[in-house]
């Protein structure tokens, strides 16, 4: 293979892995929330972009160190989730058709957050980027890759592995899975179902924020990313099957590579079209998803 | 409340609505807002038909309106048809598309249908932007000519009165429609699809009819919007517009004609009154959406009803169960 072609292929591969892992991470967060609480969080894309924007503010505007900013934002996203759960989310835990109610509520939240962006961040710039956490460049074959991007890949992969391990072995992870499978049976066996709901909401929000931070470190982003990310995360969740982290990982990687390949030949919007069609097809043929039990 | 006096009041109000634009010409800004309220009344009638009476939440509503608007513009500009011919063709075409897009509802219910409609809406917005041949992409299409009668273009009060006429026709047609057997079938499907099927209602046919009618209102509203504002872009028909039209109905009171009117009259002017603070408008709309779902699911109409019921229950010590039954009977007729 000639050198330029190899370069294109390698860059496609790294982009695919990077995007795929971030997609998978955010979709896992959405999937955990939906599988557990029945909460289809349409505002996940806004949370995603909000985390990245806050990181941009703390580092570029206020001069914080990048590592300090990232940790602070993860902590703040957890606190934000606790407050949101207390004020809004818990009110519908007992409602029978709560998934559509939650869907509309989170669409409302989406509009609130994008309205706030409208009179805050939209004045600054069109494109934002978080400064790199580590400097330097590593060569993969002939292709130079920034260490920062490699670190992003490593963090995303570790986070997904930690999710897998936590769900398999940790007490709380197993409780969340028990609630996925059968709420009543889990309650009868002594699982505090509402406590699990609360943990799932906080966990899902923090994971989404982490995804946003990682994306903002690897690529520049704009406010329009929020809606694209929401739709993509939903598409991954529906195709992979709500509540399945394996499904989120596999489909997330497939979508990431699709976007990487499509972006070489035409606009990334074509990839979004492809996700939408995939989601529509799965919704109509098998709404429970490919990886559902 | 129903009966002859009510009918008389409705006729009087309708006449006043059509004449209202002539009284408002001294202030173009107010007249414009009233015109937008009229267009939103057409839209909220269609949304109420599907969301209020059939119980499905179609988030691709604005997209269907957009298809009609773009088709109407194409027909008038490129094919040279008059507005009065292009609008029915475009609206019927959009209604056909609406029926196709409604087909998923035959398999999906509740959240999954709404998610599906959101996917369709997002796809349509992308298509409006990325296939600029008919839509001119994000730049939009400007200087859309107003409709004309006998060679004179409508403007000012006559154009406003035409919108008012459409709004009144939309409200009356929905009020008439839900009193026909088809309308009863809509409500039966909303209340219990399985039961409706069991008593011999063709649920598939009922839903297809509902989607056709809903899309017709959406399409007519879209065409009116295009000629009244004179400018369309994909942002005029995106998901936020679908949501805000849904909010008109949900805020006023779903499944109630008066509710949809009240919701529209209160909420439709807000974006124009808050024009300089567009972010604030989004925050307010979002907060209202959250509030409607969490605190007053039945909207204004249900709120008023429950207050009245409490007052009545205190006045006449009717057993609550009986009051509930009476209440339900009244609602069934609404």
Image (cartoon, coloured by chain):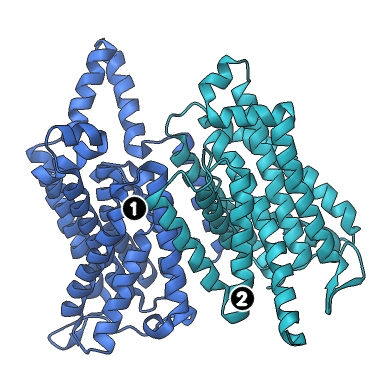
Chain colours: A cyan, B blue
Q: Position of residue B27 (x, y in %)?
A: 36, 70
**Residue B118 in view in this figure:** no
Q: How many residues crowd around disc 2 within 10 Å: few (fewer than 14), some, or many (20 or more)?
A: some
B41 to the left or right of B330: right
Q: Position of residue B154 (x, y in %)?
A: 22, 80
Dot 2 corresponds to which residue? A263
Mark linked to residue B146: none
Q: Position of residue B312 (x, y in %)?
A: 27, 19
Residue that appears at 33% across and 27% down: B306
Residue that appears at 41% across and 47% down: A286
Residue that appears at 22% across and 69% down: B91
Q: How many residues crowd around disc 1 within 10 Å: few (fewer than 14), some, or many (20 or more)?
A: many
B130 to the left or right of B322: right
Between A290 and B88, the one lying in front of the other is A290
Res. A7 image quadrant:
bottom right
Q: Which chain is disc 1 placed on?
A: B
Work out which quarter of the rendered image holds the N terminus of chain A and state it.
bottom right
The residue tagged with tag 2: helix, strand or loop? helix
């Amino acid at each position: 293979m000639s050198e330029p072609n190899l370069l294109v292929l390698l860059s496609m591969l790294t982009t695919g892995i990077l995007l795929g892992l971030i997609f998978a991470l955010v979709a896992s967060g959405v999937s955990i929330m939906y599988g557990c609480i029945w909460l289809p969080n349409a505002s996940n894309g806004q949370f995603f972009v909000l985390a990245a924007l806050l990181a941009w503010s703390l580092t570029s505007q206020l001069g914080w160190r990048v590592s300090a900013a990232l940790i602070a934002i993860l902590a703040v996203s957890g606190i934000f989730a606790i407050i949101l759960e207390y004020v809004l989310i818990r009110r519908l835990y007992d409602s029978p058709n709560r998934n559509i109610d939650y869907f509309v509520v989170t669409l409302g939240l989406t509009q609130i957050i994008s309205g706030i962006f409208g009179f805050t961040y939209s004045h600054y710039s069109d494109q934002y980027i978080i400064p790199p956490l580590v400097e330097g460049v590593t060569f993969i074959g002939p292709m130079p890759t920034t260490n920062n991007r490699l670190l992003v890949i490593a963090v995303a992969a570790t986070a997904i592995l930690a999710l897998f391990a936590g769900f398999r072995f940790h007490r709380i992870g197993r409780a969340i899975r028990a609630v996925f499978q059968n709420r009543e049976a889990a309650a009868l066996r002594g699982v505090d179902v509402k406590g699990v709901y609360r943990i799932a909401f906080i966990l899902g929000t923090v994971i989404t924020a982490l995804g946003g931070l990682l994306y903002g470190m690897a690529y520049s982003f704009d406010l329009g990313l929020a809606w694209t990310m929401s739709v993509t995360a939903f598409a991954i969740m529906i195709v992979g099957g709500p509540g399945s982290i394996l499904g989120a990982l596999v489909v997330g990687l497939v979508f990431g590579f699709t976007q990487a390949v499509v972006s070489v030949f035409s606009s990334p919007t074509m990839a979004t079209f492809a996700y939408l069609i995939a989601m529509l097809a799965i919704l109509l043929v098998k709404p429970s998803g490919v990886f559902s039990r | 409340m129903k009966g002859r006096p009510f009918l008389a009041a409705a006729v009087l109000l309708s006449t006043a609505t059509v004449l209202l634009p002539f009284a408002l010409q001294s202030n173009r800004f107010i007249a414009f807002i009233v015109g937008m309220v009229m267009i939103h009344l057409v839209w909220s009638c269609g949304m109420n038909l599907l969301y209020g009476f059939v119980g499905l939440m179609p988030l691709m509503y604005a997209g269907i309106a957009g298809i009609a608007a773009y088709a109407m513009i194409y027909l008038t500009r490129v094919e040279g048809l008059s507005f009065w011919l292009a609008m029915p063709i475009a609206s019927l075409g959009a209604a056909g598309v609406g029926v196709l897009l409604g087909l998923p509802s035959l398999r999906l219910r509740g959240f999954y249908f709404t998610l599906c409609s959101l996917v369709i809406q997002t796809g349509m917005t992308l298509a409006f932007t990325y296939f600029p041949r008919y839509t001119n992409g994000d730049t939009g299409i400007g200087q859309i000519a107003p409709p004309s009668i006998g060679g004179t273009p409508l403007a000012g009060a006559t154009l406003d009165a035409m919108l008012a006429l459409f709004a009144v026709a939309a409200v009356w047609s929905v009020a008439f429609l839900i009193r026909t057997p088809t309308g009863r079938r809509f409500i039966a499907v909303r209340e219990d699809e399985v039961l409706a099927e069991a008593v011999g209602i063709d649920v598939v046919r009922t839903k297809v009819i509902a989607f056709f009618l809903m899309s017709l209102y959406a399409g007519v509203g879209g065409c009116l919007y295009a000629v009244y504002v004179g400018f369309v872009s994909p942002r005029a028909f995106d998901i936020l517009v679908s949501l805000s039209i849904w909010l008109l109905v949900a805020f006023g009171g779903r499944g109630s004609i008066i509710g949809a009117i009240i919701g529209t009259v209160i909420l439709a002017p807000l974006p124009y009154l808050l024009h300089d603070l567009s972010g604030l408008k989004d925050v307010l709309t979002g907060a209202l959406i959250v509030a409607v779902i969490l605190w007053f699911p039945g909207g204004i109409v249900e709120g008023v009803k429950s207050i009245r019921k409490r007052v009545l229950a205190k006045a006449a010590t009717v057993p609550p169960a009986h009051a509930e039954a009476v209440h339900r009977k009244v609602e069934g007729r609404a």
